[in-house]
Amino acid sequence: MARTRKLTVSTDVHGHTAGWSETPQAPPATPTPDPTAAAFFDVDNTMMQGASIYWFARGLAARKYFTTGDLARFAWQQAKFRLLATEHAGDMSQAKEAALAFIEGWRVDDVERLAEEIFDELMAPRIWAGTRKLAQRHLDTGQRVWLVSAAPVEIGRVIAARLGLTGAIGTVAEVVDGAYTGRLVGDLMHGPAKAEAVTQLAEVEGLDLSRCAAYSDSANDLPMLSAVGHPVAINPDGTLLRQARERGWEVRDFRTGRRAVKIAVPSTAAAGLVAGAVSAGLALQRRRRAN
């Protein structure tokens, strides 16, 4: 049991004043589990500034896995994909092919190790303190908290573990003998796929979605937000902000002034899917073949 020092003021028979004493301190109360309620947090621009896959690529570039030119092409294709072609079926197919190019041949344990290192170096300082407190509030009431991201689930799991959350839902890649085959299991965790995954998890875990909360910055996540009883727009884009106001949803914005402008560049360049990863992935494959 922890102890705390306490100043005890008293006098003995000789008139001497007593000093510090130690008294037992009760441990913090353990939250009572709330098994039917949970919270689901989008990652990019919701839990962290910018996109996790972008910062992961930045970390790989610093380790010479990519060149600066590869990273620039990665960012440009991400921006083009997000701004011009987010929701069309053909573009989703292109994004899936890009994801395959990025992960093919990588070993799972290498990705997880690199994700841990890069989270500590580049992602941890970009976690929104306000969003992190919201997640902790759910944990403190005995609820479970999952991240839901289009990024590879391995990256999501690392972020969740570092933040002390329950787990992560993300894009799942096929693995054979500890290495990625270049094929995805299902589709990218994006848009309606997030709502479907949350609904399936609720069935497995016995959750009451009307008691659950979801948090996101993007209108792409309207299906997930609409699936729960307590949707919250965090740092919302224009479309989501309008929808939240029309539907009476709670809105939280942790961006202020110039800071919001500064983070808009990496956010737009990399948020959401891994479409731009094809250039970097192919470049890496060329280097491997050359070696």
Image: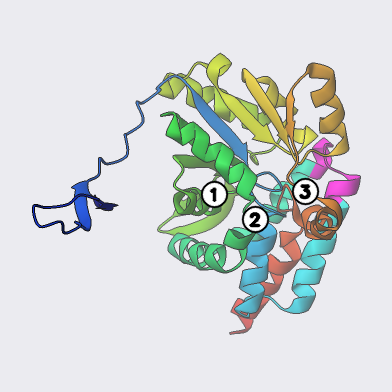
Up the image or down, 77 lies above or below 67; here it is: above
User: Looking at the image, which is closer to me, 25 or 221?
Assistant: 25
At x 76%, y 78%, the residue is 68
Considering the numbered disc 1 on the image, is that residue within a helix, a strand or a loop?
Answer: helix
Is 85 included in the stretch rendered in magenta?
A: yes
Q: Could you tell which of marks 2 and 1 lies nearer the N-terminus?
A: 2
User: Looking at the image, which is closer to me, 7 or 203?
Assistant: 7
Considering the numbered disc 3 on the image, is that residue within a helix, a strand or a loop?
Answer: loop
- Residue at label 3? 255
In three-dimensional space, the C-alpha distance between marks 2 and 3, rounded to whole angstroms, equals 18 Å
User: What's under tag 1, amino acid-wise?
Assistant: Gly
User: Looking at the image, which is closer to me, 72 or 35?
Assistant: 35
In three-dimensional space, the C-alpha distance between marks 2 and 1, rounded to whole angstroms, equals 9 Å
Pinpoint residue 241: horizontal percent, then vertical percent: 83, 31
Considering the numbered disc 2 on the image, is that residue within a helix, a strand or a loop?
Answer: helix
State the residue lying farthest toward the left: 13
Main SS, magenta region, reads helix
- Residue at label 2? 52
Q: Nearer the viewer, mark 1 or mark 3?
A: 3
Residue 1 shows in the view: no
Start-end of magenta stretch: 81-91
- Residue at label 1? 156
Within-10-Å neighbours for mark 1: few <14, some 14–19, many 20+: many
